[in-house]
Image (cartoon, rainbow, N blue to C red):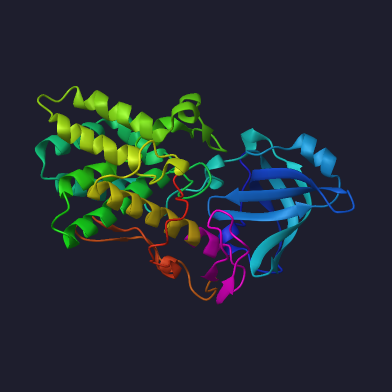
Amino acid sequence: MILTKSCFIKNIKDSQALEDLFLIKEMTRAETRAGKPYIKLVVMDSTGEISGNIWEEADRYNEEFKPGQVIRLNGQAQAYRGILQLKINRIQAVAESEVDRSLFLPTAPVAPDAMTEELLRLIMGIKDKHLKKLVLAFFTDLKFVELFKNAPAAKQMHHAYHGGLLEHTLAVANLANLVAGLYPVVDHSLLMAGAILHDLGKIKEYSFNSYPFDYTDDGRLMGHAVMAVEMIQEKIATIQQFPGQRATSLKHLILSHHGRHEFGAPVVPMMLEAFILHFVDDLDAKINTITKISEKAGVPGYQWTEYQRALERFLYVAGPDNQTEAAEPEIHTDGTTKARQSQDDVRQRLLFDSGKPFTE
């Protein structure tokens, strides 16, 4: 019999008592200043994640439980410095056969088919016949499309959920399309091909059939940018008279989109379109990351977060409006989607300084 779940993280309120099913995302044994062991726990479901500590029987819990396991948790929610956390009384093991894991794995907020349709519309707008044929060679491959629709964009940071790679790619492609429209000097076809293909190597870089997501051996040894270039070259080899310079320029965009060597880029951007791709890629990653941090705020109104190491700063974010419900995705009559929900209006649409990009 499949156990039911009634309490979802996005609906948890301050001071709420709860006992329900959650999936362990992270579990760490730590010690107090006095040397007493305790467990730092992060649990999740399909709507979000929340952290808390277990202060008693830490060594027993550390031996019996691990990330990726579904548990029954008893505790109480409490806001601490504006962040909603759990005071955990106890956790219990749950048999794998008794749970529906889809209740615990986050997914993109917009249906994959709707996002794929919008991405195909952008692909059809590529004017260069060779680049369009190359991109379509991927997106008419049903096996590739299914993997691409299901893959996360990262292991932990931005868009780290099923459908995240598609969501991120669509956003980057839309941003690139807007920038190209503002600056006629930009090679629209090259930029759009780079935006749509820049992260395709992630379908091979990550193992995402189960949670937690992890790197494949090839992914850890090579990285998604190099893997993407290999995949692109395989497709180019099937297209007659594909211009060599076009192939080199596209590969440069893929290899340089992390921006700096220290951030994993084999080469730095040396073309206008490569600079644009790097910045719009980083912009969407940061917007998604900050939005997810904002959603963890425990009380309404603007408030300071804890220090964010990945961003190297504190953030001033808007907490939830408990009086309104999140809007359903809006699908326009032309088939395009409004991928950003009304609850995401807190996103700060700023180009940050050249800090570390969130492109694992």
Q: Is residue 13 above or below residue 288?
A: below
Q: Is residue 111 visible?
A: no
The number of numbered discs placed on residues in the rendered structure image is 0
Instruction: Based on the picture, tell me whether residue 295 belongs to the magenta stretch.
Output: yes
Q: Residue 320 appears in which quarter of the rendering?
A: bottom right
Residue at (76, 47) in percent of width and height: 91
Near-viewer residue (279 or 132): 279
Residue 221 spot, x, y in % from top left: 48, 27
Across and down, in percent, residue 244 comes to 15, 29
Q: Which is the main secondary structure of the residues drawn in magenta?
A: loop
Can you say which quadrant of the picture contains the N terminus? Answer: top right
Q: Nearer the viewer, residue 338 or 242?
A: 242
Please tell me whether residue 262 is drawn above or below residue 357 in the rendered image.
above
Image check: 77 left or right of 10? right
Task: Return the residue nearer the eye: 134 or 358.
Answer: 358
Q: Quarter-wise, where is residue 145 in the image? A: top left
Quadrant in the rendering for residue 322? bottom right
Q: Judge by depth and name the residue closer to the eye, 348 or 247.
A: 247
Magenta extent: 291-317
Image position, residue 62 (x, y; %): 78, 39
Magenta segment includes 272: no
* Residue 309 in the image: above or below residue 113: below
Residue 169 drawn above or below residue 175: above
Q: Is residue 160 left or right of residue 71?
A: left
Q: Position of residue 59 (x, y in %)?
A: 84, 40
Q: Residue at x 16, y 37 (%)?
A: 131
Left-right relation of 8 to 357? right
Q: Is residue 118 visible?
A: yes
Residue located 38% across and 66% down the image: 349
Q: Residue at x 23, y 26 (%)?
A: 235
